[in-house]
Structures are given as structure tokens and as C-alpha cells.
Image (cartoon, rainbow, N blue to C red):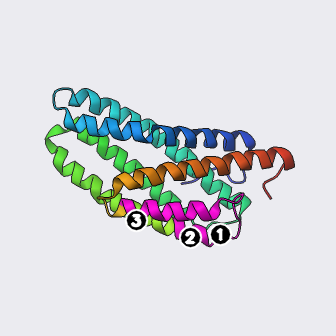
Amino acid sequence: MSEEPNVLDEKRLSLAGWLSVISAATAIPLAILAIGADMKAAEGLHLKLWNTLLGVANLVLYVYVWLTFKRLLNLKAHFTNADAFIDFSIWTSIAITVLDLLILLFATAENALAVAEIVFVIPFGIVTIVLGGKLQKCSDDLFGYRKPLAVVMIVAGVTMATVILIPIALLAGMAMDILLAVIFFRGAKFLRESGSLS
């Protein structure tokens, strides 16, 4: 994913921090809504529509947060070894969201599309594990939160890749969002006080 080089300001870091907080705060309600949409046949279409629309909104948050994190890694840590994995996770999230939209539009193919969605979740989990491993090799401590973020990424990836542990992945994802928020807020403060991320 291409983006403007060398552009990362306090406003973008703060916004990414708040979007990470929103993502963490909405994870469980979104999961409950998704389960409810699958369980209630009569109101299922209405709930599925809301679930899909909120999923698209969540995707926008995800893309913004992860592109900002990639830029932070590039500019502050001079670390580009995670770029391809971040890009892959973004494209996989887009694919999963498109499958959600297709499930909503083509109810007759719901089962096949749901299986395809699971097929995308497994590599997404594996890439998250690799991303956590790559992050452990970053020389910058990301305001003291690199190691905890890397460990949480690995836990989130393992629990996603196994599929049956997705409820744990949900909690690990929330922890990842909170750690990202703290990193972004610390970055914004550091940028405000020093004028540079270096």
C-alpha cells in the first residue's frame, strides 16, 4: 500500500490512538452483534446488515491505524521489515470484509462464503504471528511497548490461526489495540515536545 513518504504528525498519531481505543471498545459489541445476526433467523437480515456496515467502518479504522503504525515503524525506528506483513494483513482484512458483504448479498451462497472467510482468517493469523516475530527484532522500543505488543500479536495470531480459539483472539486483539493506542499517544506527545520522532 503506497502512502506519502516522511509524513507523520502529532494529529495523525493522536487520531490513530483514538481510533485504536474505539476499535478496542467496540470489539466485544461487534462480536455479540455478529453472533446475534447468525442466531436470529427472523431478524437476521436486519442484524446482518448492521453487522456488515459496522464491519466496513471497523475496516476503515483498521486500515488507518495499521498504515499509521507502519509509517511510525518506518520513520521512528527506521524499520521496514514488517511492511509487507502489515500490507498483507490489511489486504486480508479487506478480503474478509468483502466476503461479509457478499454473504449479505448472496444468502444462497452463505455457507460457501463463510468457509472462504475462515480460509482467509488462518493466513491472517499466521501473518500476525510473523509480524509479532518481526517486531521483536526491531531495535526501537516504541516508547517501551514494543515487546508487549509483539507478544500480544503472537498470541492473537496463534489464536486466530487455530480458528476455534477466536474468542481469545478477540481479547488479544483488544489488548493489541490498547497497546497501539498507547504507542500512538506517546508518539504524539514525544513529537509535540521534541518536534521530531528521531
Report the predominant secondary structure element of the magenta stretch.
helix
Disc 1/disc 3 C-alpha distance (Å): 21 Å
Q: Does the magenta stretch include residue 172?
A: no
Identity of the residue drawn at 36% across and 51% down: 167
Based on the displayed image, in which of its 4 quarters is residue 161 positioned?
Answer: bottom left
Instruction: Give 106 or 14, whichever is nearer the viewer.
Output: 14
Identity of the residue drawn at 25% across and 35% down: 37
Mark 2 in CB contact with mark 1 (< 8 angstroms): yes
- Which residue does the numbered mark 1 point to in the structure image? 138
Question: Looking at the picture, how far across and down is residue 76, in whole percent?
Answer: 73, 59
Query: Considering only order in the chain, which callout, 3 or 1, is on the residue closer to the N terminus?
Result: 1
User: Nearer the observer, disc 3 or disc 2?
Assistant: 3
Q: Which contiguous range is marked in magenta?
A: 132-160
Examine the rendered structure and indicate whether residue 186 appears above or below residue 165. Answer: above
Instruction: Give 24 or 98, whichever is nearer the viewer.
Output: 24
What's the residue type where badge 3 is placed?
Answer: Val
Q: What element carries label 1?
A: loop
Disc 3/disc 2 C-alpha distance (Å): 15 Å
- Which residue does the numbered mark 3 point to in the structure image? 158
Question: Looking at the picture, how far across and down is residue 193, in whole percent?
Answer: 85, 46
In the current view of this chain or complex, which residue is farthest to the bottom?
137
What's the residue type where badge 1 is placed?
Answer: Cys
Query: Considering only order in the chain, which callout, 2 or 3, is on the residue closer to the N terminus?
Result: 2
